[in-house]
């Protein structure tokens, strides 16, 4: 079959909502786009552990500590699913991690902002996870099978996190004056970066058309962003808080909320590596990887030794 | 008896909490993603256990204490955790070895506690023992892997033993409240030593001899580390007294 | 004007306090006994300056605030120190370089402050400038020594520059309260750049160009480091509210 | 002159209270004893910075922070004087530091106890510095000139520290119930180790006779210890606290307080390296020294370069 024929069959499957599976023929660009997107998504989960991990030792109650720790752990799990999904496309986890550490691969810019108070844990759950979910719900129907299936698992946990985040803000919003101020302050700081999570405006976005055609994406950045704004405007009322945008206003005609202009200058700066924590985040990941090298080497060496000698009955399990 | 029960329950609560706090430092910084998840799991289990113990202690105390007031509003000298669990985490080898030394102890202790007359303690122990079995298996495997891995990992494990071994004596040095509770640490010590020796043997690691043992944690005399742990742990509760979270 | 005066005075107080806190980490851990003493001296000078500023701020606020309530009972988002001073101390080279970058700034700023209309601020600056002159001389000498020392020390200084330079822009980015106070940061910037360039030249260190600058500290938007500094700094005051020490 | 003659002249000077100076003849054993004692004293000052340094970042008020920092800094200064005094006897500072780090040289065992609460800062000032001063006051008249002169400077600062320590306890003793408890607890923990600072009982002490004859020491361990007990029994009353010894009792006949038996088992264990913090203290010192190596090497290399080239007028000072 000619490449042209293969491409036609491929597109037909896409059009008929048949999932593409690892061993099937796919265009190189489709493979590459998926690798880029899935690995970027995986990296975001892993780097995303850092801003929240920052508050585990200081969580204000044992219950909150447990919730936070479990949440950050879930993110590690999501990272794992996603690395596995990307591996089905032929790229090793080690290679993906190297690309992250060299700066070649990206991760979501939102994690380059610092977590300054406890309320940030709630704001991240509500806004950041909230924004992520809209994207992820869409991705549950993405055309590449392993990615779509990973997303289904992830989405469930993620919306649980979002509810927990919102609930945690709700407690603050009903708390002392200091807690209320902390809550509002966190919303103020995380609102705009959350809107940026959907990426550049459609008019500025490259790759977007092709991704829509391949059903890797099914909604545009601006559509998702609008959906997010509409959702948050309602939810913030339950908190008795406000969103930091004087231009937020119901537009009867559009049936959506209008909102102010994003600071695209800030957006591109953070993407380019100039956010408040880009350097710290990458250094933390590199450090963990470097300091873990001897552990990985030892585990490999031990596994090798085990292969050489037949297991004695008195193994590690017998000791327990 | 009630005072001893409270003290003993707090000792168990503090020990599991502080070890959870220490292990949670690895969350997001582990050497392998799968193991990052595993050690955080252990942290979560320990945290859950500590909450059970604190809640039970609060019930017996019956003076308005809660799991949070007990964890967040007691001072360095009131904490009764084992010294072993408050030490700096060190590298992965040291964290693993600590977990193994403690899990082996906890596993034997909780088997005994399951039989204790105090029904609540027995129930908490019974519930925790499944988790503990997993912690023990996981940490044993890692001790063996690292002890019998590369030259470097072996050397690091020797260093970890050097750092930690002198804090294992306290596990078996009965505080008054343990004696009052009828905990038989002597029998645990014997089995613990056998089991640890078996794993060390397989890991090609030496079991230290004639090491002078440090103690004090059970009585509230800690290392200088605990103070720093508590400044972080308790920061928000101390800063916003009375707030609900 | 009064609000700006308070904010500005607190900004100066916070900056000197946090740098003092950071430098004091070296006390007992310096690379050479004489330098352990020297950096502790600088910590003490900065602490003294911060107390003068806090006391003055408390006087203006006239609401029962004290130097201690201002240092110990304000939160992360209320602190107005420069980001530069809250960063981890790093190795000796990084600590030295930070001190130099800050001292060069402080020296120029306090010369200007001596002339300010607010007599108290002018007096505090006048008193502090002798100390600052010494800090500047000491840290300049060390930058030169390490920049033009061994290959390793040179490499470490390059790393220190890489860590710190992006936080120097904030020194010259006027907060509202600085503008209101009539502080002329533009003229300071020019001289600062010349002086720093001269020392870097002598130290055989490159002056970075086109670095994207971080800011936020003056407005209370800090790095994740500050929270940890405050948990320790404020621990006792938070734990025993209202106690006298 | 024969060694015997030299020894006679030397002992005559001692007997006539003439100080021995660096360039003068002295018996090898006198030199060694002084080196051992002065360097041990210097090490004690340096290691002694650690338990107090532990609370600098957490001092409860800015004033207390300044006092504590200045005190720890003074100890560094004392270490410096003492290293210089020991160097006059022909041993380099580097060698002394190596001996400390290898465990060959000792330092005062008191610093192997942990500082667990803020009240420990006061208790160390009152009890530990108080015990040290009795020794040091005696040493102001020790026979080796440089040591005696260093002691004169040190004694002044040290008694200032002791007063500050006592005053700090006094504040606690008048404070909240928690502060009072903290104060009593610190006294309880530091009392016995302070008594141990005077060393073994005279009946167990080696070297002691010779040191008395050479006027390196002028009072025995037991004499100094008794003096300390008598002093503290009175001072503790001002605090409204108690000393943790049920056997403390005025002995009319002796004109001194009787006191209970020291736990010599603990004493020897700590001396042998088994105290709660021996390992931590030595590791902290070794680490500082190791991590400072590149700094010392760079400083030396730079000084060497400077020697090679004549100074340009545009030196570091001109930059300031």
Image (spheres, coloured by chain):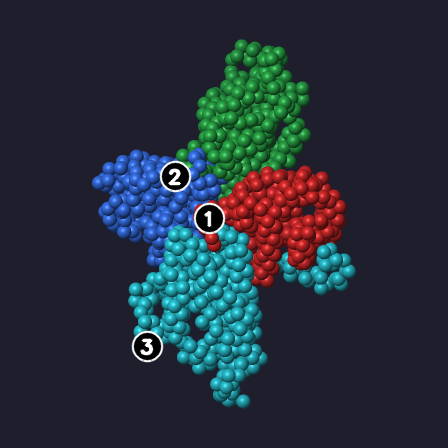
Chain colours: A cyan, B red, C blue, D green
Q: Position of residue D131 (x, y in %)?
A: 54, 24
Q: Is residue C187 left or right of residue A31?
A: left
Element at badge 3? loop
Eye-nearest disc, 2 or 3:
3
Residue ID for mark 1: B242
The residue positioned 35% from the left and 62% from the top of the image is A242
Q: Chain of mark 1?
A: B
Q: Position of residue C85 (x, y in %)?
A: 39, 46
- The image quadrant that residue C16 belongs to is top left
Report the Cα–Cα distance between label 1 and label 2.
22 Å
Q: Position of residue B186 (x, y in %)?
A: 74, 43
Same chain letter for marks 2 and 3: no
* Quadrant where the C terminus of chain C is found in the figure: top left
- The image quadrant that residue C134 belongs to is top left
The residue positioned 54% from the left and 12% from the top of the image is D13
Is A265 located above or below residue C187 in the figure? Answer: below
Checking the image for residue C68, the label placed there is 2
The residue positioned 36% from the left and 72% from the top of the image is A201
Q: Is residue D70 left or right of residue D93?
A: left
Residue ID for mark 3: A254
Q: Chain of mark 2?
A: C
Element at badge 1? loop
Eye-nearest disc, 1 or 3:
1
Q: Chain of mark 3?
A: A
């Amino acid at each position: 079959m000619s490449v042209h024929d293969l491409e036609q069959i491929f597109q037909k499957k896409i059009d008929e909502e048949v999932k593409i599976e690892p061993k099937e023929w796919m265009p190189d660009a489709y493979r590459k786009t998926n690798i880029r997107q899935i690995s970027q998504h995986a990296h975001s989960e892993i780097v995303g552990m850092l801003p929240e991990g920052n508050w585990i030792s200081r969580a204000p109650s044992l219950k909150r500590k447990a919730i936070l720790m479990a949440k950050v752990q879930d993110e590690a799990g999501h990272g794992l699913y996603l690395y596995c999904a990307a591996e089905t496309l032929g790229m090793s986890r080690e290679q993906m991690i190297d690309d992250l550490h060299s700066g070649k691969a990206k991760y979501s810019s939102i994690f380059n902002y610092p977590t300054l108070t406890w309320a940030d844990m709630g704001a991240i759950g509500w806004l950041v996870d909230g924004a992520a979910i809209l994207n992820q719900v869409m991705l549950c129907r993405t055309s590449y099978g392993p990615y779509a299936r990973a997303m289904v698992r992830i989405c469930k946990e993620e919306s649980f996190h979002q509810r927990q985040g919102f609930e945690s803000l709700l407690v603050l919003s009903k708390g002392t004056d200091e807690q209320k101020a902390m809550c509002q302050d966190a919303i103020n700081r995380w609102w705009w970066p959350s809107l940026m999570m959907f990426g550049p405006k459609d008019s500025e976005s490259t790759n977007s058309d092709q991704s829509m055609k391949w059903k890797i994406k099914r909604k545009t950045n601006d559509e998702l962003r609008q959906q997010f704004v509409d959702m948050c405007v309602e939810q913030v009322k339950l908190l008795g808080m406000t969103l930091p945008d004087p231009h937020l206003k119901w537009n009867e005609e559009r049936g959506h909320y209008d909102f102010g202009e994003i600071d695209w200058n800030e957006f591109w700066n953070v993407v380019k590596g100039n956010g408040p924590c880009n350097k710290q985040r990458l250094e933390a990941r590199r450090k963990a990887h470097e300091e873990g090298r001897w552990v990985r080497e030892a585990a490999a060496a031990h596994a090798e030794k085990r292969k050489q000698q037949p297991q004695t009955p008195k193994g590690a399990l017998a000791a327990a | 008896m009630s005072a001893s029960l409270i003290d003993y329950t707090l000792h168990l609560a503090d020990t599991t909490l502080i070890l959870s706090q220490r292990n949670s430092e690895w969350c997001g910084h582990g050497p392998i993603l799968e193991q990052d998840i595993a050690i955080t799991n252990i942290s979560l289990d320990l945290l859950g256990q500590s909450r059970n113990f604190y809640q039970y202690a609060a019930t017996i105390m019956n003076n308005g204490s809660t799991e949070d007031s007990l964890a967040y509003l007691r001072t360095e000298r009131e904490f009764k955790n084992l010294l072993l669990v408050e030490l700096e985490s060190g590298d992965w080898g040291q964290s693993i070895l600590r977990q193994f030394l403690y899990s082996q102890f906890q596993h034997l202790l909780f088997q005994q506690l399951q039989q204790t007359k105090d029904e609540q303690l027995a129930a908490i122990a019974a519930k925790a023992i499944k988790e503990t079995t997993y912690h023990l298996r996981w940490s044993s495997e890692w001790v063996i892997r690292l002890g019998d891995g590369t030259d470097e990992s072996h050397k690091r494990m020797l260093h970890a033993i050097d750092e930690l071994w002198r804090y294992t004596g306290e596990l078996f040095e009965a505080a008054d409240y343990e004696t009052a509770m009828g905990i038989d640490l002597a029998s645990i010590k014997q089995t613990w030593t056998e089991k640890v020796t078996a794993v060390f043997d397989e890991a090609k690691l030496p079991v230290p001899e004639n090491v002078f043992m440090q103690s004090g944690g059970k009585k509230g005399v800690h290392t200088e580390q605990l103070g720093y742990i508590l400044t972080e742990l308790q920061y928000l509760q101390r800063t916003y007294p009375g707030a609900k979270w």
